[in-house]
Amino acid sequence: MINGIRFLDSNVLAGPRVRPFPHRDDSVAGLLRRMDRAGIDEAYVTHAACFEYDPVEGNARLMREIEGEPRLRPVWVLVPGSSGETPPPAEVIDAMREAGVRMARFYPGRHFFSFEEWNVGDWLDLLAEHRVPVMIDLMDFMNWDAIHRAAAPRPQLPVILCRTSYRIDREVFRLMERAANVHLETSLYKNHLGIERVVERFGPARLVFGSAMTEMAAAPAVSGVMRAGIPEDSKRSVAGGNLERLIAGVSW
Amino acid sequence: MVNELLELYLAGRELPFPLYDCHSHHGRYFHFPILDGDTDGILRGLDAAGIAGTVVTSLQSMVEDPGPGNRAVLEMVRAHPDRFLGYVTLNPHYREETLRDLEVYAEAPEFVGAKVHQHISACRSNDRLWDPVYEAAEKRGWILLSHVWGTEEVRRCSETLERFPNLILLLGHGGGEHDGYAAAIGLAKQCPTVYLDPANSQTREGVYEWMVEELGPERIMFGTDIPFLDAMGAAAWVLGAEIDDEAKRLILGGNLLRLLGDRGKRWTEGRG
């Protein structure tokens, strides 16, 4: 909590990375300590093993490692349902409901799969049916055509673009105009006066706070909201209110 | 707990020391839109981030005859002498124009350094085409800000320093990635005139802690890279690091003011 504003982080990683970085603690305990130092109250967590090793193993490890931590909430990483590496999507959705998982994440670039209708349409239809927020990680994946084709026909599917860049305004503004269900996670959208610009064009509801911890430092992300030239109510929405609203919309 | 300095900063309150930025730009860029990259827009960004002053380099001067871009920076600095100082920015493929601007701005009190961008200007930093810039910077005690990303670019800086051993070389982005940071730290250990500016494009956890541990705080500066990026993130990156408050003060402006000496008085005298 900073100045009475509650921060709910949509984009946090935990778990060992292929190459440790000096002075960085990738453990769950390290993550919690970093959250305290940046004033972040709660976080939605993805396990690093999901993209460093195996998504199924990573999801299972996540549930074990954050068990009993009330400030941490799980995000499961999904891959195309036809590969055989996971149960069919409908069974995974049931497992998510039973495990209390209310957000999903795709890594089309990192996991080397097409994000087109023929490959992920079944997933997206199911997630849209239950209004489960879906994060699309842009790491090694800037296929705006595929994202547009996935998001625009499914207005009931909350889409959050994460790990973005300061170099995306030529596409993302048009995408957000055409698909009101597309949201922008803030950690790497560090454009000069960028938060002000998005709030002015689209209102505060389209931005979702994220830090990209433990890889990135959290304080820059928090400062981007706290020092933005937007009203206090807008800061509250971006810092946590918008994500809370999207999560509350999940219907099993 | 949020540390006291970061808490002040996030609440929009004044810090016990002013912030001075060693790395900002003026102009536009082909790769993506830069909105509010003019003087007023940059001032808005600095004000939002609570930054007292910045040293500016022209983006336009990197890609053509450097004259028009440097003149725009000169106008900017003269219009706001309490907020801006300039780097003269060169494009070595325009040799005559580069030599001309080095001479034109040599005695200008508004300019305190030179900028070399080996990617945008399409000329490796150890190419002899840059030598007139290095010679001028070494002779005048200018800060030479060079964009440095990755181990190979650090190696090129090492070659340059063999020929210009007294050059005050500020490594913009500080090496930019894991191996690049390690190489930049190694170069700074070998060469006492090398300074590191991690800049703002990759605000990785642990970078300032690592650099301070290896070098101490006196060789590190903070750069915003505004208007590519928001300026407050660069400051908050330092303020949130697990380094002591004196190290933060030095990195956030103290080291830059020390290097500028009398040339920095344009900024500080107005502050009383």
Image (cartoon, helix red, strand yellow):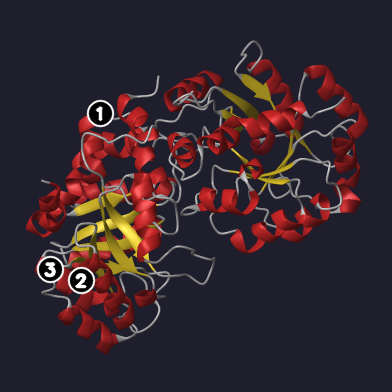
State the image coordinates of residue B69 (x, y, percent, origin top left). Answer: 33, 77
Q: Residues within 10 Å of mark 1 (few under 14, many from 20)?
A: few
The residue tagged with tag 1: helix, strand or loop? loop
Q: In 3D space, how far apart are the residues under numbered discs 3 and 1 (Cα atoms)?
A: 34 Å
Query: As shown in the figure, which amino acid type bears the numbered disc 1?
Result: Asp
Please name the residue shown 37% across and 62% down the image.
B40
The image quadrant of residue B108 is: bottom left
Q: What is the chain letter for disc 1?
A: B
The residue tagged with tag 3: helix, strand or loop? loop
Residue A60 appears in view: yes
Please name the residue shown 45% across and 51% down the image.
B201
Query: As shown in the figure, which amino acid type bears the numbered disc 3?
Result: Pro
Tell which residue pokes out farthest to the top in this image. A68
Please give left or right for residue B253 compared with residue A107 in the image.
Answer: left
Query: As shown in the figure, which amino acid type bears the numbered disc 2?
Result: Tyr
> Which of the two discs, 3 and 1, labels the residue nearer the N terminus?
3
Indicate which disc residue B244 carries. 1
Q: What is the chain letter for disc 3?
A: B
Q: What is the chain letter for disc 2?
A: B
- Evaluate if marks 1 and 2 touch, with contact meaning CB atoms under 8 Å apart: no
> Which of the two discs, 1 and 2, labels the residue nearer the N terminus?
2
For marks 3 and 2, give the one nearer the viewer. Answer: 3
Q: Which residue is mark 3?
A: B109
